Amino acid sequence: MFVYRSAATISPVDYMVCSHRLRWPELLPWVAIIAAYFAFPSYLALGAQVMIMVLFALSLDLVLGYAGIVTLGHAAFFGVGAYTAGILAVHGWEEAITALPVAAAVAGAVGLVTGYIILRTRGLTLLMLTLAVASMLGEAANKANWLTGGADGLQGITLRPLLGVFHFDLFGRTAFVYCALVLFAGWVFVRRLVHAPFGRSLTGIRENAARMHAIGAPVRQRQIIVYTIAAALAGVAGALEAQTTQFVGLNVLSFDLSGAVLIMLIFGGVGRLYGAFVGAPLYMVAQDALSRLDPEYWFFWVGLLLVVTVMFARGGILGVADLLRRKVMR
Amino acid sequence: MKAGAVPRQERVSAVNEFLSALVSIMFHGLAYAMILYVVSVGLSVTMGLMGFANLAHGVFAMAGGYVAISLMSRLGLSFGPAVVLAVLVVAAASVVLERLLYARLYGAGEIEQVLFTIGLIFMSIAAAKFMFGSSQQELVLPAALRGEVSILGRMFPTYRAFIIVTGAIIALGLWLGLERSQFGARVRAAVDNRRMARSVGIDTDRLFSLTFALGSGLAALGGALGGELLTIHPAYAIEHLVYFLTVVAVGGLGSIRGPFLAAVLLGVGDTACKYLLPDIGAFFIYFALFGLLLWRPAGLFGRA
Amino acid sequence: MTVALETRGLRKNFGAMVVTNGVDFKLAAGARHALIGPNGAGKSTFINLIAGRLTPSAGSVLLAGENVTALSQEARVKRGLGRTFQINTLFANLTVLENVTMAVSERLGRGGDKLRFAGSRRDIVEEAYELLKRLHLAEDALRPVREIAYGRQRLVEMAIALGLRPRVLLLDEPAAGVPSAETAVILDVMEALPADMAVLIIEHDMDLVFRFAKTITVLVRGAVLTEGTPAEIVADPRVREIYLGEGRHG
């Protein structure tokens, strides 16, 4: 979208018509994931967690990066997905794959209803309402002990082997491959969406909502749709979390998680599709390292990093990389 | 059981009990509301004036509480001077933060402001934990504020009565001082049109710093005074974030009266619902919030 | 004459301040019509009322005879209303071509497509590019809008509106902020507009107005003072007194 210098030789129309073609750096995450599977056999469980967060951050990128809706409550949908998958499993629906669309549907429905209500407002009020939705759901999960296990968390999740063959093993091999495949599907879907006219129009809404109204685009409707889609996707991420850890705690609906996913995306780069792939692993590795170095106060350093990022590296890592590359090319 | 089956005397005492519960709810609710108001009103002004999504506003309230408590326990100051000093210290510190960090983000997007202030919250939690430990800090009240006071033949906790009176005075002072004064006119002019305000000779930088200091100082005052109602602990800024933001959003950004009404509504409503319906009372605030904002998206006193 | 756009008793007040005061106005099909008036006459408010960005306090707006007062901006655009903004309202980080493609794509009802790539509709991109050529913007097609000069951004404003192929086009000060040397290009573009398109322009540049408009309406303090041909307007002593005396310098 931003690199136009290389286009000097072909016509603008050709250039734009080709803009969605797959470029080789886009395959790097998948190379890394496959490599990680073989290189770090003892960290596969962590790898699965990282990929879940990538999917979660990817869903946030749709809302925040593309549509420009700032949300402090994206964990609401992750949490709803996690509880849906967990509760299904506890009540006998032990088939993991079919639970994913159910979790997506439930989280999507929550996204649709809350989005319909709160997307009437803008700015700080909207920000606060996203936070309120998540904390209301957190309160509800806390109170509904009989369904969610309340503060003790939802325990006793058991799953049948995937496709009847692959057991969720102790080393997390199945979980890793399972998460990788779901993430891949999620990536294909989101990539298609952002390169489709719908995705372009979301960018338009973010850049200038007044103009989108003036060219006849149904702005609010599109916002509600993307909010719903992102909610469903976050729900899938939550379901994966519940299935792979076989536990759901109240933290899946917490402000901490909403904040964490926001930070991951910001570290990686917002509105770039690949910010999630860079930011989530980095955040989780950094968190892991920091919490080992300074178990009591590690989030001080996360906070500091965040302040520094906002002050000096607005585009996140990918943004800075882009800037450097352009400087070198000049 | 039918009402008629109850002996007269029991009925009278039941009515009495209900009334006394009602009075008690009003009383505790109002005290809570005043703290919410004093902390949040500064947020309303900074958000309205600078358009800054300052999620870290509660940090200043927490800091006020910690400073006041430390001044009392470590330096032996009495309650009054400790609170005043805490407000001044926090207000001064906030100006430094404003000039060094906040001011650079006035023109930035909401995302940047949100993340920046979340970063501040994280750092404040860790810093508070480091300096004061993770336990709650007890606010030791002076003897005059302990115990009960008799109002119209009923006994009330003195501390809460004190909070209500103080809160009402602050609200009145702010209303007269900001909605009616020269300073207030300047602030409002700068809110409406920053460039225009600058061109007629208003030093907007200084005005912003002053306003920011005022907002943070008020938060510190609320934090310190309300230390027994909203206990001071490291996660203070996150725990009460929804409530502070709700008061501001429902009241209307930039308004002085709005947050007062919103705080009273939410403080009393929240207290009443949690008292009368312990199981589901905690949801009151959310329903009130969604309902009110659907009815008036810009808040009670907000400009559409 | 066929009326493309009409307002009846259109009124807008913000609190006690009346900005538009019972305006009855007709725009003929294919018109070249200018709306002039001193600062604060309520011209932009009037445009925003017609476009549906503001809701009138009273009165109605009719597009080709259909009452659209209660309809959203989107619905009015679908019925053939296009507009530009007084202050550039563009997608600053997207390229010029992307800006215009967005409008063409919405006009064709493809803006909400989710599972096919935007690039798969070559015809849409080509149409947008043709439009850029017509507006002398082709060489900037792949540059982000924020990087091109303000005067050229004004042309992008018009290109986006034209991408909607409106039957009624509202131009809100198309030459505002443009150096006078460059207004010729804007006038060129305006003169090349399709003859069946009704154009209503607000403009402070009187040169531009008198070269372009066949009909002029003078708005003063939210109400219509007079309407007529440019010659009639120039001759009208009230207009000279109220408006032209101070505005001619533009």
Image (spheres, rainbow, N blue to C red):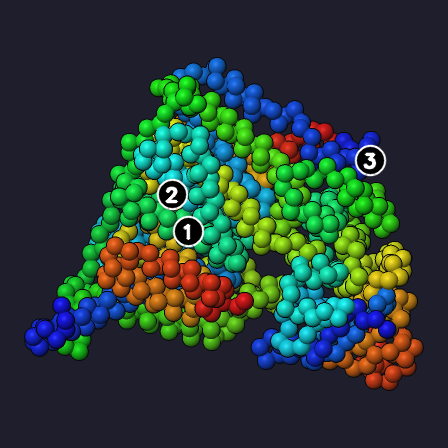
Q: Which mark is residue A133?
A: 1
Q: Quadrant of the C terminus of chain C?
A: bottom right
Residue found 72% across the figure and 77% down from its top: C8
Q: Is residue B218 above or below residue A254?
A: below
Whether residue A29 is visible here, answered yes or no, is yes
Q: Nearer the viewer, residue A143 or A290?
A: A143
Question: Measuring 71% from the left and 58% from the top, which residue is drawn there?
Answer: C78
Drawn side of residue A57 relative to residue A218, left or right: left
Q: Quadrant of residue B72?
A: bottom left
User: What's the residue type where badge 2 is placed?
Assistant: Leu
The x and y percentages for residue C46 are 71, 71
Q: Which badge, 3 or 2, is on the more N-terminal residue?
A: 3
In the structure shown, which secondary structural element does the residue marked by tag 2 occupy? Answer: helix
Mark 1, secondary structure of its residue:
helix
Question: Hey, which quadrant is residue B288 in on the image?
Answer: bottom left
- Residue underneath mark 3: A11
Real-space CA distance between mark 3 and mark 2, rounded to the nearest whole angstrom: 49 Å
Q: Amino acid at mark 1?
A: Val
Q: Is residue C49 left or right of residue C241?
A: left
Tag 3: amino acid: Ser
Q: Is there any visible trace of residue A267 in the rendered image?
A: no
Residue picked out by circle 2 = A253
Work out whether residue A322 or residue A82 is closer to the camera in this orientation and state it: A82
Residue under the image location 42 percent in, 63 percent down: B291
Local crowd size for mark 3, using a 10 Å CA cut-off: few (<14), some (14–19), many (≥20): few
Question: Viewer-proximal residue, A90 or A312?
Answer: A90
N-terminal label among 3 and 1: 3
